[in-house]
Image (cartoon, helix red, strand yellow):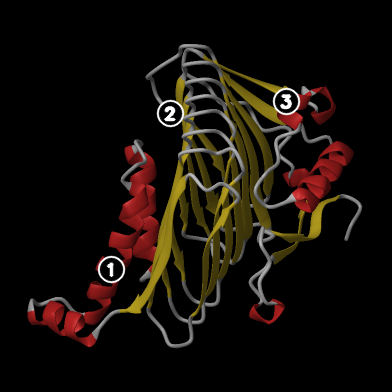
Amino acid sequence: MADTAFSFDCDVNQFPSLTWNHLNINRGHLRAEAPAAGRGTDRALPAVPDGITVERKPLADLPPVLSGIKSGMGAEFDRQFDAAAEKLGLEAEVYTVQEGRTGGASVCLSLEGGDGIRDILLVARKGSESSFIFEASGDTGSLAGNRIRILAEEGARVHVALVNLLGGKLMHFDSVGAVLGQAARLELTELQLGGSKVWSGSLCELSGESSSFEGRLAYLVDKDRSLDVNYVARQTGRETASSMMVDGVVSDTGSKTWRGTIDFVKGAVDAKGDEQENVLLMSPSAVNKSLPVILCDEEAVDGRHGASIGRIGADILFYMQSRGIDELSAKKIMVKSKVATASRFIQDSGVVDRINRHLEGAFA
């Protein structure tokens, strides 16, 4: 790869507890590059609401409590990201939510028009509330991606929305890592609807007592696109709670892999976890792999997991057609209902409108 490129060639989304290699589900592989010009260093910092500050910092200047946060796509991904960032001068965008700050508008950050790599740190101080929306759109270039690391202090509440509306020729990644303090809460709402090859990883460390994580993912994988996802909730604190709810559609010759892991570490007394995926297959050529798993080193926990995979039944199509709804419209309704399970949690009408327009274009 060119010396001037922001490049990756590494295994990502490593499953914490390996299964049979012949299933090809233990890990994904990211091989991609973006020109140095797409590294995003010169992008203007956005306006932020009162109670939130933003600044750029070189990776070398980040305190260990931030630089040490692991992101969800894995250690080798983080190593290659850091090496390229230091070489090309990519600085981290650090958003700090002041202690006790509540309410107000979301911070909306957009990657538009193709190549762009963004390194984001969100620091939510004690007792604060904040909301961040990351939207990726455009149909030129080769690679667009976010690494987002979150530190939520005691009692902080953070909502992060990831919205992928990229054109069908771009590759994309979202790698999220979070550390939650006592009674802190992270809500992650993710919509993966665009791009050609997409990787998404989320690692949430619930180390603080009574901390909680709620992840929601909706996806549409059509044509010959692929999506590789790995969610891990590692619960070490007492009385922690995690939830992962995934809904999506795979059609045409699309390929999707979802790994979900709830890891109850010794000492996570009275912790709870629940992960569920509901997949709708719209083509006999579509490939779906789902792997919901619970790892348990602590007896006093409550964990549930499952996956439901099905197709649109002939009886449902017949019923809808008997009500004047043709087959294409019926499929469109089903897709929109899946996406709405996540998009309804996004409190920005403009973003929701763009999501709906993107879905309309998918059926054009």
Name the residue tied to disc 1: 334
- Closer to the chain start, of discs 2 and 1, is 2
Q: Say the numbered circle drawn on residue 360.
A: none
Badge 1 local density, few (<14 within 10 Å), some, or many (20+)? some
Secondary structure at badge 3 equals helix
Secondary structure at badge 2 equals loop
| Quarter in which the N terminus is drawn | bottom right
Given the image, on which type of amino acid does mark 2 rest? Ser
Q: Position of residue 188 (x, y in %)?
A: 47, 42
**Residue at position x 52%, y 51% from top?**
137
Name the residue tied to disc 3: 65
Secondary structure at badge 1 equals helix
Given the image, on which type of amino acid does mark 1 rest? Met
Query: Which-is-in-front pick, marks 3 and 2?
Result: 3
Name the residue tied to disc 2: 106
**Residue at position x 22%, y 87% from top?**
314
Query: Relative to 326, does residue 191 appear above or below in the rendering?
Result: above
Contact (Cβ within 8 Å) of mark 3 with mark 2: no
